[in-house]
Amino acid sequence: MIEATLCFPRRTRGTESDPTEEVLLIEKRRGLGDGWYNGPGGKLEDGETPRECAVRETREEVGLEIDPETLEKAGELTFLLDGERHTFCHVYRTRSFSGEPTTTEEARPEWVPVDDVPYDQMWEDDQFWLPGVLEGETVVGEFRFEGGQPLDEAEFVGHDLEWNEHLETTDT
């Protein structure tokens, strides 16, 4: 089973009387999900905590620096492929970061208004859990795919979600 992270940096743009909430998404340029949008993230390395992974992956993919203490745990997602656990994903969000996002070999970053997230260009399951996460809720979810490897070619067949569950904030 793969253990991974996703990180969703947020910011407010515009004027005080007309603010726009934005989330940083990446367009994947290679690997699993190539050509699709998601948050920065990836697989945990040996000895790395989920928070450390989210910080490292965000830095490597888009060049933002994040203090791991500012990451808010927003979700725990389990992905099943043909009935077997395939991936467990820790989801984080933050409003505290430094630097400007830059394009890398792996990802092209884009600030997107929260109301205009391109769900039709993302994993099919994202439409079920990401809106709540962007609104400040927490989620525990299970998503089922069938059709063999690789995961991005499998068919999405169902999901179960639990909202506003208490999530462990420590990385163990």
Image (spheres, grey):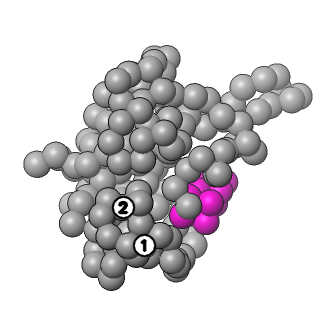
Q: Which mark is residue 151?
A: 2
Label 2, label 1: how far apart the Cα atoms are: 8 Å
Mark 2: give few (<14), some (14-19) or many (20+) Cα within 10 Å: some
> Looking at the figure, which quarter contains the N terminus?
bottom left
- Residue 102: image quadrant is top left
Q: Which mark is residue 145?
A: 1
Residue 105 position, x and y percent, is 35, 24
Helix, strand or loop at disc 1? strand
**Residue 114 higher or lower than 143, as above or below:** above
Q: Amino acid at mark 1?
A: Phe
Q: Residue at x 28, y 74 (%)?
A: 85
Report helix, strand or loop for mark 2.
helix
**Which range of residues does the magenta coloring cover?**
125-137
Residue 162 lies, with reference to residue 120, above or below; the image says below
Task: Write the residue at 65% across / 51% down.
Answer: 120
Q: Residue at x 42, y 47 (%)?
A: 33
Residue 63 shows which numbered tag? Answer: none
Asked whether disc 2 touches disc 1, contact meaning CB atoms under 8 Å apart, the reply is yes
Q: Is residue 9 visible?
A: no
